[in-house]
Image (spheres, rainbow, N blue to C red):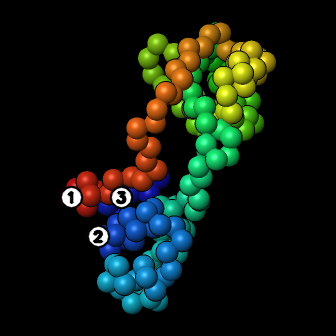
């Protein structure tokens, strides 16, 4: 994993601008970070090569795409062995409804974020898909009533002061 101390303040500015607008032109990016275009592009390519930038994506409106139901689901496994973990990881990775999957410490093993069209789709997902994944013993679901805040950006000002 790259060490954040190997990047400087200009790299952090580049990363900050790119995570806010991944479609920014190199000319505009170089202007915003006060570099000429060639060194700016070289830095950006180095940040990509070193794995600081994992990729670029568009943020879509789930409501316009018929995926307005968002749920967080706690998943408890019946056994916690490396084989079951691997099988669960593989199976959950194949499900397009699952936007995020995190292994956590605490009273359950995983928390999933899923996006579905409606409650009927959730019921089908729970009954036909989730409970049949390898090792699943129990689930607890939290349906999102209103999304207050959703960020894809990482706060970089704390890194600059480290």
Q: Earlier in the sequence, mark 1 or mark 3?
A: 3
Give the farthest residue toward the left. 161
Q: Where 32 sits versus 49, above or below?
A: below
Instruction: Provide residue 160's location: percent of width, then percent of height.
Output: 25, 61
Q: Where 18 sits versus 104, above or below?
A: below
Q: Is residue 59 left or right of residue 135?
A: left
Q: Residue at x 34, y 70 (%)?
A: 13
Q: Residue at x 36, y 58 (%)?
A: 4
Q: Secondary structure at mark 3?
A: helix
Q: Nearer the viewer, residue 79 or 40?
A: 40
Instruction: Provide residue 24's location: percent of width, then percent of height.
Output: 49, 75
Label 1 environment density (alpha carbons within 10 Å; few <14, some 14–19, many ≥20): few
Tag 2 residue: 9
The image quarter in which residue 77 lies:
top right
Quarter of the C terminus within the rendering: bottom left
Q: CA distance from mark 2 to mark 1?
A: 10 Å
Tag 1 residue: 161
Q: Residue at x 63, y 18 (%)?
A: 81
Tag 3 residue: 4
Q: Where 43 sits versus 117, above or below?
A: below
Q: CA distance from mark 1 to mark 3?
A: 11 Å
């Amino acid at each position: 994993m790259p060490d954040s101390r190997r990047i400087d303040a200009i790299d952090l500015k580049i990363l900050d601008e790119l995570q806010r607008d991944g479609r920014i032109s190199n000319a505009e990016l170089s202007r915003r970070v006060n570099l000429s275009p060639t060194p700016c592009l070289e830095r950006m390519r180095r940040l990509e090569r070193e794995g600081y930038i994992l990729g670029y994506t568009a943020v879509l409106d789930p409501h316009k795409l018929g995926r307005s139901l968002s749920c967080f689901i706690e998943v408890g496994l019946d056994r916690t062995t490396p084989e079951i973990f691997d099988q669960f990881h593989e199976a959950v990775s194949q499900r397009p409804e699952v936007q995020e999957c995190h292994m956590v410490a605490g009273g359950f093993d995983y928390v999933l974020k899923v996006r579905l069209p409606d409650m009927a789709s959730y019921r089908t997902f729970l009954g036909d898909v989730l409970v049949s994944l390898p090792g699943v013993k129990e689930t607890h679901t939290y349906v999102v009533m209103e999304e207050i805040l959703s960020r894809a950006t990482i706060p970089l000002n704390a890194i600059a002061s480290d």
